[in-house]
Image (cartoon, rainbow, N blue to C red):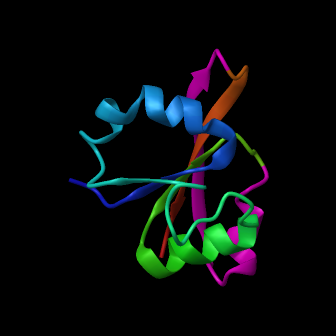
């Protein structure tokens, strides 16, 4: 089993649709806007800092979200397109901290 993953607010529907699949890889899912430490309007730098502090991966539809990891003190990230969300008409990116 891997660590935890955060599902960003812009792809919450995708995260809900794929919850069972994701739980085969991750110990738990945290949804932005539903987790007490990840408020709906949390800025990307706060989410990045939370990922750094708690060893989480991030799934998002925002291709530039990784830049906030550097602002949060992360030295290297790995980003890849994980899936395509047809209902949301957007890619789903997986951002992992490499340290």
> Does 65 appear in magenta?
yes
Is residue 90 positioned above or below 8 on the image?
Answer: above
The answer to whether one can see residue 82 in this image is no
Residue 96 location (% of width, % of height): 51, 59
Residue 45 location (% of width, % of height): 73, 72
Residue at (74%, 56%) from the top-left corner? Answer: 65
* Image quarter of residue 47: bottom right
* Image quarter of residue 44: bottom right
Specify start and end residues of the magenta stretch as a single range.
64-87
Residue at (61%, 35%) from the top-left corner? Answer: 92
The answer to whether one can see residue 69 in this image is yes
**Residue closer to the observer: 6 or 35:** 35
> Does 27 appear in magenta?
no
Is residue 16 positioned above or below 8 on the image?
Answer: above
Residue at (56%, 56%) from the top-left corner? Answer: 78
Residue at (79%, 52%) from the top-left corner? Answer: 64
Residue 18 location (% of width, % of height): 41, 29
């Amino acid at each position: 089993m891997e660590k935890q993953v955060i599902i960003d607010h812009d792809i919450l529907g995708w995260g809900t649709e794929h919850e069972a699949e994701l739980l085969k890889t991750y110990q738990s899912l945290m949804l932005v806007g539903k987790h007490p430490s990840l408020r709906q309007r949390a800025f990307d730098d706060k989410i990045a800092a939370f990922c750094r502090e708690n060893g989480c991966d991030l799934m998002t539809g925002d291709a530039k979200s990784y830049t906030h990891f550097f602002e949060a003190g992360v030295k290297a990230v790995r980003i890849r397109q994980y899936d395509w969300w047809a209902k949301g008409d957007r890619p789903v990116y997986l951002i992992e901290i490499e340290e």
